[in-house]
Image (cartoon, helix red, strand yellow):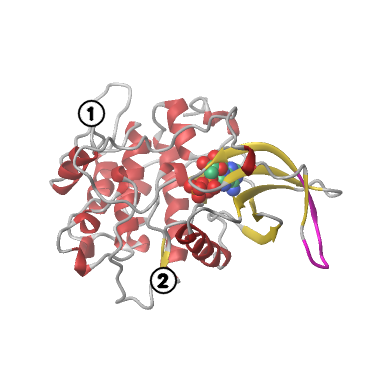
Amino acid sequence: RTVMQKPTKDARPKPEEKPANPDRIDDRWRPPVTVTEPGTSSQTYVVGKKLGKGGFAVCFEGRTQGTQELFALKVVKAKVEQKKMMEKFRTEMQIHAKMQHPNIVEFYRAFSLQDHTYVVLEMCDNGSLTDMVKARSCLSLPEVRRFMIQICGGVKYMHKRNVIHRDLKMGNIFLDANMNIKIGDFGLAAVLADEQDRRTTLCGTPNYIAPEILSKSGARGHDSKVDVWAIGIICYAMLIGIPPFQSKTQQEIYSKLKTLDYEWKVDSKNFIPQEAKDLVATCLNLVATERPEMDDLVELGFFKTGVIADVLSRECMKAKPMWL
Ligand code: ADP
């Protein structure tokens, strides 16, 4: 999970997502075997296997008793050490609860019980884009087109409602059973008062952070265009396998991104069309106002000059589809 952070001189970049170690769950996180939601329409969830661990939450499978419907149960210890963390979690829930879009993880409900808070989320069976790209090294053009269009759809919905996600990255982009994109983790999201409103908090993940967030004149703030920058990074990372400014240290990442120091590695097995490079370059514009809106992005040549994967099976989490 990404938290607010200050850039330090030689802090190593955090690996984008640490794979969860299933053998190590701090006991205080482990919820009871069944959890019954308080209230009249009470629902009992049977807690299943652990799905993953974030900064201050652990996700488990949760199946409703009776109907056997499957959900992701995000469990947060109610007495989270820091008050600030709990406040952030509350903001996250407030924003996420208002989001309803086919490409955003559905937030069903949240309730507190004894010393845990539970968030019932749509289950994303196939993990995240990080898992997929790790297993595949890089994705095919038809897959990237499909995922990009769906990401843009979800982000357009947020931006229209003045919500900026601020932590878009492959690890926060999940895949459902039908390999549809589901954007999740609203832990750093913010609601802007209006289109002119800007934020000045330094936040994000080094590889995906937009230059204006780092800029010394940060007082000028940032807006929804930080998400567009992150989408450029995600597109590159899906095509190449690693983010464009990947380096050993956080400081190096920052100095590379400020000068747009990235290249497209030529590889006989992985052809990248000019239209894809153009899309990435438009998003990775140092001048935030010049980055495209979601509506402009989906009109770019990349989506008009090749196949868009219509149906994908879960096998493509591990191997390139046969038809590609
Ligand atoms: P954070 O603390 O960073 O907000 P999350 O609690 O959102 O982290 O997620 C922790 C991990 O749980 C994720 O990396 C992922 O593996 C898993 N996870 C989160 N949400 C879902 C979901 N809706 N469906 C399936 N797995 C999920």
Q: Is residue 99 magenta?
A: no
Can you name the residue that lies furthest to the top here? Answer: 268
What residue range appears in magenta?
A: 38-46
Q: Which residue is mark 2?
A: 162
Residue 306: numbered disc: none
Q: Is residue 42 magenta?
A: yes
For the residues bearing labels 1 and 2, Cβ distance under 8 angstroms: no
Q: Is mark 1 within 8 Å of ligand 1?
A: no
What secondary structure is the magenta-colored segment mainly? loop
Q: Whole-percent x and y of residue 324?
A: 46, 29
Closer-to-camera residue (202/116):
116
Quarter of the image that includes the N terminus: top left
* Residue at point 62%, 40% (across, down): 125
Kind of residue at disc 2? Asn
Q: Which residue is mark 1?
A: 265
Would you say 269 lies left or right of 185 here? left
The image quarter containing residue 21 is: top right
Q: Earlier in the sequence, mark 1 or mark 2?
A: 2
